[in-house]
Image: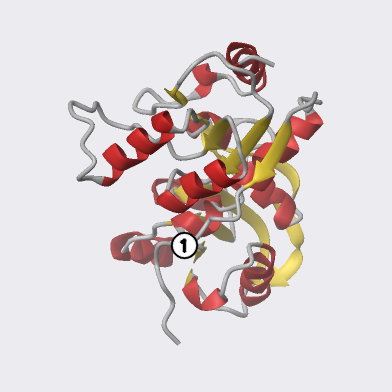
Amino acid sequence: MLFSEFINELRCIISEDMQEEWDNSGIQIKTDDSEIRRVLVALEITSDVIDEAVEKDVQIIITHHPLLFNGIKTVDTDNASGRYITRLVRNGINVYSCHTNFDKMAGGNNDYICDILDLDEVGILFDEEFTRCGYCPERTLRETAELLADKLETDISQFHIVGDPEQKINFVGLCTGAGAEYIGAAALCGCDLYVTGDLKHHEAREAEELGIAVIDAGHYGTEKIFPKAFISVMIDNEFTYDIDFIESECCNNPFNLLK
């Protein structure tokens, strides 16, 4: 399948029109219209991911976080983005990103977390497409955090928790990545718990005052599932053909945990 054909098929499954105005989902780098046989799926472009792509002889990398967010005036190998772009082009590796459109879509990151938490009657908070909410089997906040840490393969000590660990949790709201702005909506909808990442101090205080528990599982922690979620969507839509989708082995948390 040619690159152009691959992208057209992908756009039919994950519409670029669903992305936010400020986003830059879509083609990041196109080197040519050559045959696509092997696809590496990663959270984002890093030096290690590029090394992996070269080693595994892939023709395109699919990422969640766009490589190019703001306008670039200079490609300079003295900075990370310049080095990434130069190496990718030299090796003939294309890059395509599915960011906010993948967060919103059925089967995307948010729905993947809903499955992890075994939520029923899944919906959204008011009309906020980035969010999900649903009912879970009754368990405590502590048990929910332990389940989430286990499924995300994350050390629970990296989570920040707001609320009584022994309180009962039944109705859960969530937004992967950075979704603290929806804490108020989750509280108004009657959520016992809200799951997200990148929680700030004043947002934690707001949740405390609103009486809603929060699990901050981290931006990376809640989005590291992108490769699995993306490949699952491809399988569900029978978008396999003779293309080999490969989950990157280089998805590492930029924050270290000292013990």
Q: Position of residue 63 (x, y in %)?
A: 52, 38
Q: Is residue 89 above or below residue 156?
A: above
Question: From this viewpoint, is residue 134 visible?
Answer: no
Q: What residue is pinned by disc 1? A: 253
Q: Is residue 197 left or right of residue 194?
A: left
Q: Is residue 196 left or right of residue 234?
A: left
SS assignment at label 1? loop
Applied colour scheme: secondary structure
Q: Position of residue 162 (x, y in %)?
A: 46, 70
Q: Please tell me which residue is depicted at 40% across the width and 62% down the height of the picture.
A: 254
Q: Please tell me which residue is depicted at 42% across the width and 48% down the height of the picture.
A: 46
Q: Quadrant of residue 4?
A: top right
Question: From this viewpoint, is residue 75 visible?
Answer: yes
Q: Position of residue 234 (x, y in %)?
A: 73, 31
Q: Is residue 257 left or right of residue 202?
A: right
Q: Is residue 209 above or below residue 156?
A: above
Q: Position of residue 141 (x, y in %)?
A: 62, 72
Estimate how packed mark 1 is, as few (under 14), some (14 to 19) or many (20 or more) residues with alpha carbons within 10 Å.
few
Location of the N terminus (image quadrant)? top right
Q: Quadrant of residue 198?
A: bottom left
Q: Is residue 96 above or below residue 43?
A: above
* Label tally: 1
Q: Please tell me which residue is depicted at 45% across the width and 27% down the height of the picture.
A: 25
> 114 and 123: which one is in front?
114
> 112 and 74: which one is in front?
74
Residue type highlighted by circle 1 = Asn
> 238 and 158: which one is in front?
238
Q: Residue furthest bottom?
A: 259
> 33 and 13: which one is in front?
33
Q: Quadrant of residue 118?
A: bottom right
Q: Please tell me which residue is depicted at 32% across the width and 32% down the height of the picture.
A: 69
Location of the C terminus (image quadrant)? bottom left
